[in-house]
Amino acid sequence: MRRRGYYGGFGGAFLPEILTATFEHLEEAFAAAKADPDFWRTYVELMANYAGRPTPLTFAPNLTRHFDGAKIYIKREDLNHTGAHKANNVMGQGLLVKRMGKTRVIAETGAGQHGVATATMAARFGLACTIYMGEVDVQRQRPNVFWMERLGATVVPVRDGTRILKDAINEAFRDWVGNMDDTHYVLGTACGPHPFPEMVTYFQSIIGREARRQISEQEGRLPRRVYACVGGGSNAMGLFSGFLDDPVELVGVEAGGQGLAGGRHAARLASTDAGVGVAQGYKTYFLQDSDGQMRETHSIAAGLDYVGVSPILAHLKDNGRVRFEAATDDEVIAAAALTMTKEGLIPALESAHAFAQAFKEAPTLRPDEAIIINQSGRGDKDIFTVADAFADPAWQEFIIQKAEHYKRMKPEG
Ligand SMILES: *Cc1c(COP(=O)(O)O)cnc(C)c1O
């Protein structure tokens, strides 16, 4: 018999005894919601009227011409309310919270994007909201803290440990243990103990369902490949789940940081620096050193800077269904720059990882083949990082060279 919440050897729910009943309640509520056709209909309506769905699938004629290979389509998750796919997950969990009759939500956030999305949902549904954030991140992400508070949330700076995301996760779990009766923990990605990976994937699958329908209408056929960046794995699982049973190649792109060789990256599935372990309540590949200690991760994109990864993606790596690659910080800036000037789109630096890998491969495909890149979010938040990169003349030069380099990558014959 398949153990619940396992994907191959990954996943599970490694929980303190005291949370068992809460997780069973959540699992039952989610199963009942999924079995109720009204629930998905209500969710789709909410996303249409509140968040701006369906998001378009935009053909990119200029990038297509530039690379002279596959037709490039972009799934526009940047157009969701709050600027990223994170809205799909929080609004879905909000509907579930209402069904469960709970009145308070908590969440942890690193860069602040998930905190803002959760605070938005809480305001809409009339729920009390507490957001845990490492003290270092509170300092770094002032604008997001400001908006969370204006949206009515309480932001709690966490002063334990290294005062970053993982310390905030511990604190959020501590809160949950003390307030299980009225509180739901809104996990932000397709990670953590069962049923979160499955539940977050379920809500994000709206991306893949739309994309499959849209490409079929616009191209009259399925794409050859689809690309998504991978932090915890939720936007990737959302897009991929639309094509899992099709003859479509799925490519997940992780943060290559300053290059895989030097160890300053967050590539859990595309590098050999990760090992299988149990942490934060689930089993997956974690970036760890030879003693099993969690390694420090690095990425130019805060949303990809995480030591673990979705257990579902870990399984899809092991069975070969998804290919994993890594894009370095400089490739990412170059890809974002090219996308801005060619198409007038400003992808989040997280999303630009998917663009960078797609740009490497597009010239090697035929003009009658299509690819889809998931633009998981908008890049407005990255203004200072991008400005820093462009302030350096060497970067400018690199970016121009890179665009030329991409063009020359077309294979002979
Ligand atoms: C948070 C975030 C990500 C990473 O999260 P996943 O769960 O891997 O999707 C990617 N892109 C954007 C724009 C984000 O805000």
Image: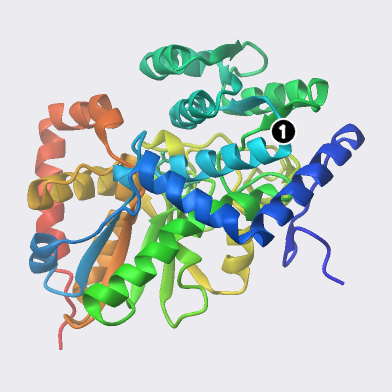
122 left or right of 177? left
Height in image: 405 above or below 149? below
Counting labels gives 1
Question: Dividing the image into four equal quarters, which quarter contains ligand 1?
Answer: top left
Height in image: 396 above or below 68? above
Residue 407 seen in render: yes
Residue 234 seen in render: no
Depth check, front residue: 295 or 171: 171
- Element type at mark 1: loop
Q: Position of residue 212 (x, y in %)?
A: 38, 70
Q: Position of residue 151 (x, y in %)?
A: 45, 17
Q: Residue at x 22, y 73 (%)?
A: 218
Q: Position of residue 18 (x, y in %)?
A: 90, 32
Q: Residue at x 44, y 69 (%)?
A: 250
Amino acid type, label 1: Gly
Height in image: 350 above or below 2? above
Among the 4 quarters of the image, the one containing residue 170:
top right
Q: Residue furthest toward the front?
A: 38
Quarter occupied by the C terminus: bottom left
390 left or right of 45? left
Depth check, front residue: 271 or 14: 14
Q: Residue at x 50, y 14 (%)?
A: 152
Q: Residue at x 31, y 76 (%)?
A: 216
Residue with the mark numbered 1: 101
Q: Residues within 10 Å of mark 1 (few under 14, many from 20)?
A: few
Depth check, front residue: 61 or 49: 49
Height in image: 22 above or below 282? above
Residue at disc 1, CB closer than 8 Å to ligand 1: no
Quarter occupied by the N terminus: bottom right
Q: Position of residue 130 (x, y in %)?
A: 60, 18
